Image: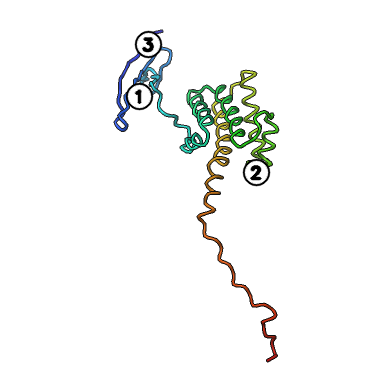
Amino acid sequence: MNGGADHFLLQCRGCETVFYQQSAWDSEDIDYWYEPDGSTGSAPSLTITTYPRPDSKTKPAWVSKIGKVDSQLGSILDETYVAYDNRSFILTSMGLRTALDRATEVLKIDAAKPFKEKLDELQTGGWIGATEKQILEVVIDAGNAAAHRGWSPGADEAAQLISAMEIFLQKAFIVQTHALGLKTSIPAKPKRAKAASAKSATPLGKP
């Protein structure tokens, strides 16, 4: 077995950030293909590593707004997305459970209560419906299994868990807040003119 690595110091042409990049290969990881003449071509499969890592590509833009609502929740989400991007799915599951725990606290639910009671209060308070409650129960179970039993979800499973949390967080902290804020800018419904009172009205057929 043999291999090697090339090292680069690069600069982004847009933001002008300078970063380090390593392009490594080894003889155990080779890509093969067929040339037009039928012969077989091959080349090492390159593993590209950059430092510092670029910003998360999976994190929605609105997540940064949650950090303005609560910096601790924002930090938890940032680290959870970093774990997901690095395929650390055990940490991803634990991070999602922790984010849900902090989110309920931000929504003024007693932090000392068990998760089941917190979900009950989320539903009673109108933050989630029955189906969303069941989905968040899966997020909690996944986080518990990762934290206490070392369970690691697959890539697709981790993506589904993140999507489930995103739906809840966006509704609770972004959509609901903005939608309620629109109420003051929507013109009121015009009031109908009051009908004449029965006493002042002249009965038909009488002078």
* Residue 185 versus residue 62 in the image, above or below: below
Q: How is the image coloured?
A: rainbow
- Mark 3 and mark 1: Cα distance apart in space: 24 Å
x 64%, y 39%: residue = 132
Question: Is 30 on the left-hand or right-hand side of 139?
Answer: left
Secondary element type, mark 1: loop
Query: What type is the residue that disc 1 sits on?
Result: Glu
Query: Quadrant location of the C terminus?
Result: bottom right
* Among numbered discs 1 and 2, the one appearing first in the sequence: 1
Q: Mark 1 points at which residue?
A: 35
Query: What type is the residue that disc 2 sits on?
Result: Gly
* Among numbered discs 3 and 1, the one appearing first in the sequence: 3
Secondary element type, mark 2: loop
Classify 10 Å Cα crowding around label 1: few (below 14), some (14-19), many (20 and above).
few
Closest to the camera, between mark 2 and mark 3, is 2
Q: Residue 3, which numbered label?
A: 3
Total marks shown come to 3
x 59%, y 33%: residue = 103
Residue 45's spot in the image, x, y percent? 40, 19
- Mark 1 and mark 2: Cα distance apart in space: 61 Å
x 59%, y 72%: residue = 193
Q: Name the residue under label 2.
A: 126
Query: What type is the residue that disc 3 sits on?
Result: Gly
Closest to the camera, between mark 3 and mark 1, is 3
Secondary element type, mark 3: strand
